Image (cartoon, grey):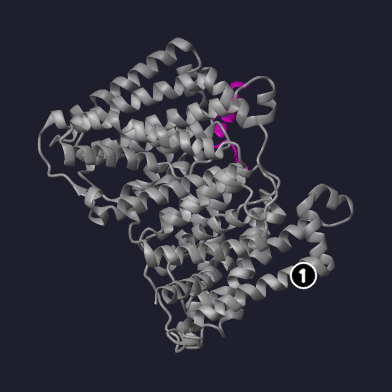
């Protein structure tokens, strides 16, 4: 195994470029030879992964733990759906319009809580998520209340409706590639360095001239901008939205759990976390679905164990292993 | 007539506030001493409520008489989880603490679903629907018990923290853990004590609360969200502030339910929460916590 790893020589830059290009190509041509079931599973994985990367940008690098991240999903879903249902605006445009309310929300939450103890941010994100959910339930004449908004399936590419799974796959795949690129640039760029410094020691980072408030706000806005379009995609792909499915506390917590298990504050962490936990979740759903609640038990256990023994997530374990095998 | 409804709404609000107060007092004790927000707080209540429910189910005794069992179980659970989990994160940063207590919460919810399914389980007591009449206004018997319990616990804590040696040690540890340690206080024991206090307050209340709310895996999560709001209104870590905050929240929710809409009342609670963050983040009784950065 070790020899094989060394044989691949993954640390050389050229080879890594080839590998990445190969992986991008592989997932791009995957719909040609796989069944809709696999594609649906991959779409779910990609959506979770985008949310998780978005979560990582604010909560991974800094200590501000967002536990209500699906609020952006909900805003994206509801804005585009309401615009389409009431005014006939294409969800493609609605997707862009929905960026405005979530940016505004990110700024408001940021200004309110970024100067406080980290726990306040966590509690505020939960609070905002609940407020949005209850508002969506209450104003039934706009949002459809607890019945939600239901689309009839049709083939209408201009309005983001497809009958097949494949077009949806490509849409979310392109969104994922853009997200990963943005995340990579942030991780390697100035913003990422500033955020890591703030996460390590905020007072020290301010004293060397980092505008902590501005960096955190920027990170949160980028995070919101990444997560919101997934909401529109979700509404179009699933075909119906209800407040409890998009403004979902459980989903928000799941995104945070995946990010923390994978390794918060790293570029690869969310990716590793998603590819560890989504398969586990799927296996549990398929083979042990009669044991209702087992997925929560495993999530909780994994979260506690990783945070206690590997505070930097599974990625730190893998990095340690690679460093260790290099010695021999 | 109008004022009658208002006064009745206020009385109802005080009654509901008692439940929030019970939740928030434990949360505040733990935060005040250990500087840890216990996201699993509601789940201790949930497990204790299941203990009550099953004791009631099998032994057919009144839920109040089952209180010693729920207390014992929550103490046991608190003790075990303290040594397995909490012990290891006390000195870590709050990010880890939030994550781990949240993991504990998810874990306990999962266990409850796995063992007892997500069914809503209710206990009917003979006194559940009975009211007492205070000058034309009504207060239900379970609410009265909640109020007595909340006030009793607060008074007990007040005297405990003020007049006993352990209580003074606890306050010292909450002000400055290192300094208190240097004076010979065993900080780890104080932390364990604070944790068990917080857990047993909800554990004891389960006998009353199981007669009011249905027992199901998410009951704790639903209630703890209010408790967070209450704790922030009153000032995190300040249990008297929490008590006042609970009644403020209870009354304002009850008035909103009466005059605006019942399904928006939780949204209103969070609105208060955000307003408090905006105006006075340290809460009405708290100390300054704004980090200058």
State left or right for residue A173 relative to residue A113. Answer: left
Q: Which residue sits at x=63%, y=44%?
A: B94
Compared with A33, B13 (above or below) is below
Closer to the camera in the image, B273 or B85:
B273
State left or right for residue A238 relative to residue B251. Answer: left
Residue receiving disc 1: B160
Look at the image and tell me in which quarter the N terminus of chain B lies: bottom left
Q: Residues within 10 Å of mark 1 (few under 14, many from 20)?
A: some
Q: Residue furthest top?
A: A14
Name the quadrant containing residue B95: top right
Compared with B196, A34 (above or below) is above
The range drawn in magenta is A308-328
Q: Residue furthest left?
A: A155
Chain of the residue displaying label 1: B
Q: Which residue sits at x=24%, y=48%?
A: A142
> In the rendering, at what x and y percent does residue B85 appear?
63, 54
Question: Most prominent secondary structure in the magenta stretch?
Answer: helix
> In the rendering, at what x and y percent does residue A325 appear?
58, 25
């Amino acid at each position: 195994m070790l020899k094989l790893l060394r044989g691949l020589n993954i640390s050389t830059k050229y080879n890594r470029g080839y590998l990445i290009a190969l992986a991008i190509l592989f997932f791009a041509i995957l719909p040609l030879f796989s069944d809709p079931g696999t594609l649906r599973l991959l779409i779910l994985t990609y959506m979770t992964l985008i949310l998780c990367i978005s979560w990582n940008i604010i909560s991974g690098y800094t200590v501000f733990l967002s536990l209500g991240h699906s609020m952006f999903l909900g805003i994206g879903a509801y804005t585009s759906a309401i615009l389409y249902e009431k005014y006939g605006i294409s969800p493609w445009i609605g997707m862009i319009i929905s960026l405005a309310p979530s940016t505004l929300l990110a700024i408001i939450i940021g200004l309110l809580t970024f100067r406080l103890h980290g726990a306040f941010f966590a509690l505020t994100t939960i609070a905002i998520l609940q407020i949005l959910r209850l508002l969506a339930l209450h104003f039934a004449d706009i949002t459809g209340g607890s019945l939600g908004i239901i689309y009839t399936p049709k083939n209408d590419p201009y309005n983001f409706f497809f009958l097949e799974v494949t077009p949806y796959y490509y849409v979310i795949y392109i969104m994922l590639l853009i997200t990963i690129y943005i995340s990579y640039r942030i991780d390697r760029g100035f913003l990422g360095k500033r955020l890591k410094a703030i996460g390590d020691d905020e007072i020290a980072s301010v004293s060397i001239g980092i505008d902590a408030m501005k960096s955190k706000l920027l990170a949160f806005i980028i995070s919101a901008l990444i997560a919101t379009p997934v909401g529109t995609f979700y509404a179009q792909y699933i075909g119906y939205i209800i407040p409890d499915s998009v403004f979902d506390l459980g989903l928000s917590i799941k995104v945070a759990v995946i990010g923390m298990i994978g390794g918060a504050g790293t570029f690869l962490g969310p990716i590793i976390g998603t590819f560890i936990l989504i398969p586990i979740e799927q296996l549990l759903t398929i083979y042990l679905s009669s044991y209702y609640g087992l997925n929560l038990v495993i999530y909780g256990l994994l979260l506690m164990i990783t945070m206690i023994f590997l505070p930097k997530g599974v990625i730190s374990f893998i990095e340690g292993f690679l460093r260790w095998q290099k010695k021999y | 007539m109008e004022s009658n409804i208002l006064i009745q709404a206020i009385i109802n609000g005080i009654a509901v506030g008692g439940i929030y107060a019970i939740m928030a007092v434990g949360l505040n004790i733990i935060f005040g001493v250990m500087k840890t927000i216990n996201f699993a707080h509601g789940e201790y209540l949930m497990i204790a409520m299941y203990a009550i429910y099953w004791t009631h189910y099998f032994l057919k005794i009144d839920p109040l008489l089952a209180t010693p069992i729920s207390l014992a179980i929550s103490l046991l659970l608190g003790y075990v989880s303290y040594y397995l989990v909490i012990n290891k994160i006390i000195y870590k940063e709050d990010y880890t603490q939030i994550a781990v207590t949240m993991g504990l919460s998810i874990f306990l919810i999962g266990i409850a679903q796995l063992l007892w399914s997500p069914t809503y389980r209710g206990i009917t007591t003979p006194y559940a629907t009975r009211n007492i009449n205070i000058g034309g206004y009504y207060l239900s018997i379970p609410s009265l018990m909640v109020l007595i319990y909340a006030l009793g616990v607060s008074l007990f804590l007040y005297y405990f923290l003020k007049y006993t040696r352990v209580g003074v040690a606890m306050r010292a540890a909450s002000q400055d853990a290192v300094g208190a340690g240097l004076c010979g206080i065993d900080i780890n024991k104080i932390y364990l004590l604070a944790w068990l206090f917080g857990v047993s307050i909800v554990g004891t209340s389960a006998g009353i609360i199981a007669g009011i709310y249905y027992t199901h895996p998410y009951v704790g999560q639903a209630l703890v969200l209010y408790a967070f709001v209450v704790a922030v209104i009153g000032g995190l870590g300040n249990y008297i502030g929490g008590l006042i905050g609970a009644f403020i929240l209870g009354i304002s929710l009850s008035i909103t339910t009466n005059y605006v809409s019942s399904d928006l009342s939780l949204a209103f609670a969070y609105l208060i929460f955000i307003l408090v963050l905006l105006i006075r983040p340290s809460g009405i009784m708290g100390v300054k916590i704004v980090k200058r950065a």
